[in-house]
Amino acid sequence: MNNTPITIIGNLTKDPEIRFTPTGDAVARIDVAVTPRYFDKTTNTWVDGETAFWPVTVWRTQAEHVAESLEKGMRVIVTGTVKADRWKSPEGEERYRLAITADEVGPSLMWATATVAKATRAALNTPPDDPWATATKTPPTGAGSDRPANRSTDKAGPPRKSTPSKATAGKSTSKPRAAESAGAGQSDEPPF
């Protein structure tokens, strides 16, 4: 099948609408307004171009995530394939429009921040007999989490004291993790 890939960046014109098919699959509809901008050298200003409104269809688990996470006015990035929707109007006229079936949808971080929370397997409709659905993972540490970035308390046994290595002994550093990562090499996190 010869699909036409597309990526758009724009603002949601309304809150996502979610429905469920008779088989139980979630389907969400979002509308994205895309306005190109260009710099007009004659007036030395930025000028808005013609706004295009794209209807986007999102399927299954991602549709539920979109409905829970996004709302009107948010700037989003959508990648997917373009398709032509064709139908007859009540008057019998042939109509069509271009629409996008989304592969991925996410917030744009150009002028906003986002906190990502990974969906659990239970939330992804995992069958009850799946032994991996109940497995737990150690929560993240460091920047952006509620837990401290002290890895020595994450391992089994009593907490270890942090001692400076020969390379860092007596030296002051403006990066608190620099001494830890330069020491015994115990940290698997980047030094930023």
Image (cartoon, helix red, strand yellow):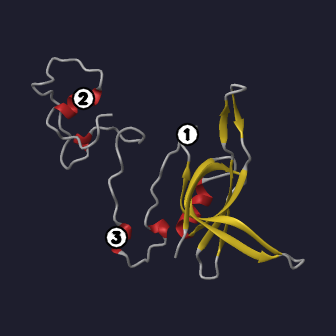
Residue located 73% across and 67% down the image: 97
Circle nearer the N terminus (2, 3): 3
Secondary structure found at label 1: loop
Tell me how far mark 1 sits from mark 3, CA to CA: 36 Å
- Residue 95 lies in quadrant: bottom right
Residue 117 position within the rendered picture, expressed as x and y whole percent measured from the top left: 47, 52
Q: Nearer the viewer, mark 1 or mark 3?
A: 1
The amino acid sitting under disc 1 is Met
**Is the Cβ of the residue at disc 1 closer than 8 Å to that at disc 2?**
no
Residue 169 position within the rendered picture, expressed as x and y whole percent measured from the top left: 14, 21
User: What residue is disc 1 on?
Assistant: 110
Secondary structure found at label 2: helix
The answer to which of 181 and 108 lies nearer the viewer is 108
Circle nearer the N terminus (1, 3): 1
Secondary structure found at label 3: helix
Q: Nearer the viewer, mark 1 or mark 2?
A: 1
- Neighbourhood count class around disc 2 (C-alpha, 10 Å): few under 14, some 14–19, many 20 upward: few
| Residue placed furthest toward the front | 42
Residue located 20% across and 40% down the image: 159
- Neighbourhood count class around disc 3 (C-alpha, 10 Å): few under 14, some 14–19, many 20 upward: few
Tell me how far mark 1 sits from mark 2, CA to CA: 30 Å
Lateral position of residue 85 relative to residue 68, left or right: right
Q: Which mark is residue 132?
A: 3
Tell me how far mark 2 sits from mark 3, CA to CA: 36 Å
Residue located 54% across and 53% down the image: 106
Lateral position of residue 32 relative to residue 188, left or right: right
